[in-house]
Image (tube, grey):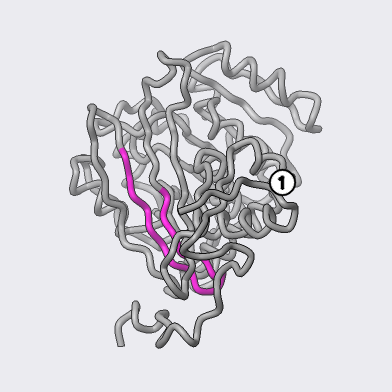
Amino acid sequence: MSEISKIQHQSPESVEQTCPQITRGKEILYLTHGEIESLGYTPSDIIKLVRIALTEHGKKRCEMPAKIGIHPISNTLHHAMPAFVPAAGASGMKWVACFPENYKYNLLQTSGLIILDDVQTGWPIAVMDGVWVTAKRTPAVSALAVEKLAPRNSSEVGILGCGVQGRGHVMALATVMPDLKRVKVLDIHPEIAQQLVDDFKDHYDFQLVVASSIEELVRNSDVVVTATVVLKKPNPLIEDEWIKEGALLLPVDIDSVFFWKTMKRADKFLVDSLDEMNYFMSIGYLEHGLPQLYAEIGEVVAGLKPGRENDKELILDMNVGMGLVDVVVARDVLDRAIKRDIGTSLPL
């Protein structure tokens, strides 16, 4: 029996209507960025949802083809990210774009929409902003990786890139690192790094500082997050000798800033989805390929493979984003919005 057939429902009658409050085939619920923000999600809420998504992926109880996309300008992308997660009653797709030079137009580099469908009939039932979901679910994946892969009693973090993802990672990692004492941040735009520090410094007990250099950011950090831009041709910035023994490296920007030497020598190399990494390679990214794969992060979150086994292991977990995480979070957003009577009903 194929993996897909194992998760498919055998007939429409065996499936409950996804969202009875929405008249399928007649209307959709539209949710804006601000409306989703008003629902009051905490980092812990998102981590809980992402844990479900990663566990289902690790146990192969979902359907998620690799991304497909178009790439109108160098180093840009539009990706279609469909997924079906039976355990969450979530079926849909995120259509997302990443244009790193959007700052020139006073726009975020990442944009997107999420469409959710009724599992029983296939009709769309909701369309919502995808920027908020992307901003929250990506750091939550990193937080779960930290739970399983970071050294014991990790107390120092370095975050390269202080945009939406950098900010999200400060909040998510603070949620899962009880011994956190110092977070160092750095950005190509110094004022953005300083703004992050100014905005968050009174919210946490740990020290939050702007690093003077990438070397200072990386040295002595138990966890290093790189949230810069995804580049077709890498621009390595982090020298291998700066990396602390036993560190956990979390590149949200694939191989853009790490040297191949570092990636290749990792004791454990993980990704979120091998299929999606293969897709990136097929369109010219990851010019060195991938080191030997230890696991997908879902396998570790699901308890199918061990995480960190000693404090000397160098572990690198490369997560580029999976549609199944988006639809699981989006389905919960939809349910919460309906309970609070938030959103706009639009006719089809």
**Is residue 247 visible to the viewer in this orientation of the structure?**
no
Q: Is residue 179 left or right of residue 242?
A: right
**Image quarter of residue 331:** bottom right
Q: Secondary structure at mark 1?
A: loop
**Is residue 64 visible to the viewer in this orientation of the structure?**
yes
User: In the depicted view, which residue is nearer to us: 125 or 326?
Assistant: 125
Return the x and y of residue 237 as percentages of the image width and height: 38, 25
Residue appearing at x 35%, y 47% in the figure: 265
Q: Amino acid at mark 1?
A: Leu
User: In the depicted view, which residue is nearer to us: 31 or 164?
Assistant: 31
Q: Is residue 302 left or right of residue 170?
A: left
Q: Reply yes or no: does residue 162 show up in magenta.
A: no
User: In the depicted view, which residue is nearer to us: 24 or 199?
Assistant: 24
Q: Which residues are magenta?
A: 78-94
- Mark 1: give few (<14), some (14-19) or many (20+) Cα within 10 Å: few
Residue appearing at x 34%, y 79% in the figure: 3
Check disc 1 and report the residue beneath it: 39
Q: Which quadrant of the rendered structure holds the N terminus?
A: bottom left
Q: Which quadrant of the rendered structure holds the C terminus?
A: bottom left
User: In the depicted view, which residue is nearer to us: 33 or 44?
Assistant: 33
Magenta residues: mostly which secondary structure? strand
Residue appearing at x 57%, y 52% in the figure: 29
Q: State whether residue 173 is above or below residue 303.
A: above
Return the x and y of residue 72 as percentages of the image width and height: 23, 31
Return the x and y of residue 307 as percentages of the image width and height: 53, 62
Return the x and y of residue 163 as percentages of the image width and height: 53, 26
**Image quarter of residue 6:** bottom left
Q: Reply yes or no: does residue 79 show up in magenta.
A: yes
Number of callouts: 1
